Amino acid sequence: MRRRGIRVLPGGDYGFAWTPHGTYARDLQHIVELLGYTPMETLLAATRLGGEIMRMPDELGQIKPGFYADLILVDGDPLKDITVLQNRDKIVGIMKGGVFHKDPDRGTTENVPDVADQPVIVNA
């Protein structure tokens, strides 16, 4: 598929004993180790290509002005070791809708505002 230019995106059915919720980052490792994609290609598939496949390439999947602000901050380099994304202790910040769910300054989810139902758009 890679040689033929077929876009491969991570994802699957979760909530089963063999694929419990919270193990999504393991898919990224599989794409790298089993399918031969680079970590960069894999992260682009999980982000930018995700926005494209959802027919929202001008709103999702990139860190740009006007895009939805959902991201994670990790203590490590997933381009060198994609498995760092599976280590919850290495996730130092989580932003959903432009609001920190896990504040990197405090390293905790305590006293962090609840995420509103309305998405927040990043403005330059």
Image (cartoon, helix red, strand yellow):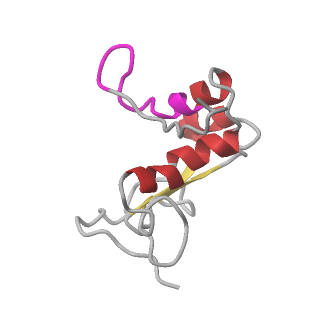
The x, y position of residue 37, in whole percent, is 67, 33
Q: Quadrant of residue 85?
A: top right
The x, y position of residue 21, in whole percent, is 35, 30
Q: In the image, is residue 59 above or below residue 82?
A: below
Q: Which residue is the extreme one toward the left? A: 117
The x, y position of residue 35, in whole percent, is 63, 24
Q: Residue at x 51, y 29 (%)?
A: 27
Q: Is residue 57 toward the left or the right of residue 119 in the image?
A: right
Q: Which residue is the extreme one toward the bottom? A: 124
The x, y position of residue 108, in whole percent, is 48, 53
Q: Quadrant of residue 115?
A: bottom left
Q: In the image, is residue 90 above or below residue 49?
A: above
Q: Is residue 25 magenta?
A: yes
Q: In the image, is residue 49 above or below residue 99?
A: above
Which stretch is magenta? 14-28
Q: Residue at x 52, y 55 (%)?
A: 48
Q: Residue at x 68, y 45 (%)?
A: 40
Q: In the image, is residue 93 above or below residue 9?
A: below
Q: Which residue is the extreme one toward the right? A: 80
Q: In this view of the protein, can residue 78 be seen by the observer?
A: no
